[in-house]
Amino acid sequence: MDKIRRILVPVDGSESSDRAISQAITLAEVCEAKIAFLYVANINQLAINACLSDAILEAVTKAGNVILDKALADVPESITAEGFAETGSPAVVILDFANSEGIDMIVMGSRGLGIVKGVLLGSVSQYIVEQSKCPVLVVK
């Protein structure tokens, strides 16, 4: 297996996501890898009434920044980490990001914050495992 240099951690503020952050930090320390935290605002889910107000977009962005800031605050100074916020369908955005950024491993929670708790990110993590070109560690 190739050396793990870049680890992608999709974050959503859930407990499962927090456990994935801890696991990624441990891996990054051992592998001397960089961590990229990715928050995906699932705008498709929010765009039910087609026109998103600026207030809603701002609230979603702010929520994402809070989650990213918290994740970055957990990382020891010895590890390089960055936070990224994107919008769209989480599974698609995560895979596109992993491919375009040369990610060597994805570490993600098995369940996240969804409309029906567990159903949404459960399906996202399963999709990522099936479609990803790099190894995926699903943290329970």
Image (cartoon, rainbow, N blue to C red):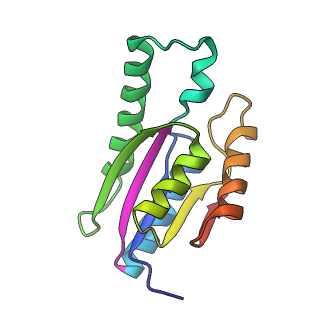
Who's the residue at 71% across and 63% down the image? 130
Residue 15 drawn above or below residue 128: above
Residue 27 appears at what percent x and percent y? Answer: 46, 73
Report which quarter residue 115 is drawn in. top right
**Magenta-colored stretch includes residue 38:** yes
Residue 91 appears at what percent x and percent y? Answer: 61, 48
Decide if residue 135 is on the left or right side of residue 40.
Answer: right
Q: What is the residue that sits farthest to the left in this orientation? A: 77
Who's the residue at 38% across and 63% down the image? 35
What secondary structure is the stretch in magenta mostly built from?
A: strand
**Magenta-colored stretch includes residue 98:** no
Q: Which residues are magenta?
A: 32-40
Which of the two residues, 126 or 78, is positioned nearer the viewer here? 126
Residue 15 drawn above or below residue 50: below
Who's the residue at 49% across and 46% down the image? 11
Which of the two residues, 13 or 99, is positioned nearer the viewer here? 99
Decide if residue 13 is on the left or right side of residue 125.
Answer: left
- Which quadrant of the figure contains the N terminus? bottom right
Who's the residue at 49% across and 14% down the image? 52
Residue 19 drawn above or below residue 70: below
Report which quarter residue 77 is drawn in. bottom left
- Which quadrant of the figure contains the C terminus? bottom right
